[in-house]
Amino acid sequence: MVDDSPGISRRRLLTTGAVSAVAGAGIGVGGAALLWSHPHAGVWYQPDRNGAPPVGGLHLQFGRNASTEVVVSWHTTDAVRNPRVLLGTPTAGFGNTVAAETRTYRDAKSNTEVRVNHARLTNLTPDTDYVYAAVHDGTTPELGTVRTAPSGRKPLRFTSFGDQSTPTLDKLSDGKYVSDNIGSPAAEDTTTAIERIAPLFNLVNGDLCYANLAQDRIRTWSAWFDNNTRSARYRPWMPAAGNHENELGNGPVGYGAYQTYFSVPDSGSSPELRGLWYSFTAGSVRVIVLQNDDNCLQDGGDVYVNGYSGGRQLAWLEKELAAARKSRDIDWLVVAMHQVMISTSDANGADLGLRQKYGPLFDKYGVDLVLCGHEHDYERSLAVRGVVSGSETLTPNPVSSATDNIDATHGTVHMILGGGGVSGTTNGSFFKDGTGKVLTAVSATPGSNGKRTPTYVKEEAVWSAVRDLDHPYGFAAFTVDPGRRPGDTTTMHVTYYNVNKPNGDLSVFEKFSLHRKRSDG
């Protein structure tokens, strides 16, 4: 059951308790003012009386070691002075100041420059609550809290969804109010639901705000952060870039906005590809985040960028997977990405390019979970390994019929979690005859719609386990039970929640679990 009873949450207590410490930190504002924060602190708010823009879109990311590294980020469209974060503990107050690095990009559509400040907090204590305040000269500090991940094998919980968009209506040049980025009120409900679950971190599996569809891309990014800062300032939201993060003219391969707004762990990639793939470790879980437009066949962004890394992402992926499976500290391998390798929807379908390139690596190194979006519905596979013999679509081969208690050493479970809030839901588009479709090729040149024309082949969906035909919106929560001693069985309990219209109430759609022996046996 989900506890949605009213009350004061633990993080609210931590934040409120920090107010007096901020007042004594020499910022020059009164304690009463610190209890107030913008309900929508985006870049479109007027400057305060000191003339500086407010702290907009406050959000967190983990570093590669989630037990010791956190990044605090916020943005403006005006230059600011001395961006910094005051860091402390709930009991001792703010004892440290960390300077922020400012990154910028200029939106090619509006010619507006966005400045994003990233303060990297390092040498933190594992499994510990911290309070912080993000501020730059002349503005009101914005407060937040964060808990670092545990080090070693301790219980933890994380959540995941994709394809959110925003809950806002925006005024267009003709005076009409519309959602020009296919948003819906459910985008707001999902954020509320994540806070009710209160995970250690949240994985966002691509197509964050659909800014590339909007008339004003910067406004749309701002609206996404406005909606989500009420969660993302208290727990890291770790993103994967989807096809709708690809924006014409922004950066070398179209992800310049995404790369500027987020400061994710360094993968050693070249500067122009910074942040498009990365990994981090929380407890005994290694999370690997991929950017699939490099390896999928589908033409889904503003620019067709298939193969943009020249194989560098795949080489990095194999190195990461091999190192994780050799480690006696890592039990669980979770991959987060956008486009899918399984689908029984008549929307996008599965992508042969991903099956060709990722499938052998996921099998070789025993990936436990693959979390995706792209299809705006919920579906999961049986445990799969290898391909069905003679299949031209490389149909994933189910190795077990178990759906409730799954031995993760036998195969990989794929989950489509595309019900984050976008209006164009596809739960009504599932094939009813036990088949799926696979995109096997695209035309060499764009068609009349500006996209490369896809070729689809139908397959028997022998791998399909569970689908939600009735509910468009939802997310998954993952709770890790590490076991007690070396060689024990560790279990990951998974709950998929529906976020129900019209009020965003939660209900449990299904529960299942994965288990495997710990790697320290």
Image (cartoon, rainbow, N blue to C red):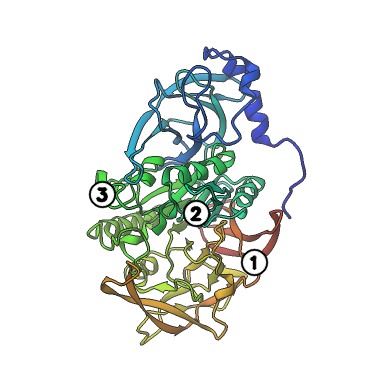
Q: Which mark is first along the chain, 1 or 2? A: 2
Residue 490 percent location from the top left of the image: 56, 57
**Image position of 218 (left or right of 381):** left
Front in this rendered view, residue 391 or 281: 391
Residue 337 lies, with reference to residue 229, above or below; the image says below
Residue in the picture at 46% in, 54% down: 210
Residue 99 lies, with reference to residue 42, above or below; the image says above
Disc 3 or disc 2, which is closer to the eye? 2
Gap between marks 3 and 1 measured at Cα: 38 Å
Q: Which mark is first along the chain, 1 or 3? A: 3
Residue 278 percent location from the top left of the image: 37, 49
Residue in the picture at 31% in, 76% down: 441
Q: Which mark is first along the chain, 2 or 3? A: 2
Q: Quadrant of the N terminus?
A: bottom right
The dot on residue 180 is 2
The dot on residue 471 is 1
Pointer 3 residue: 252
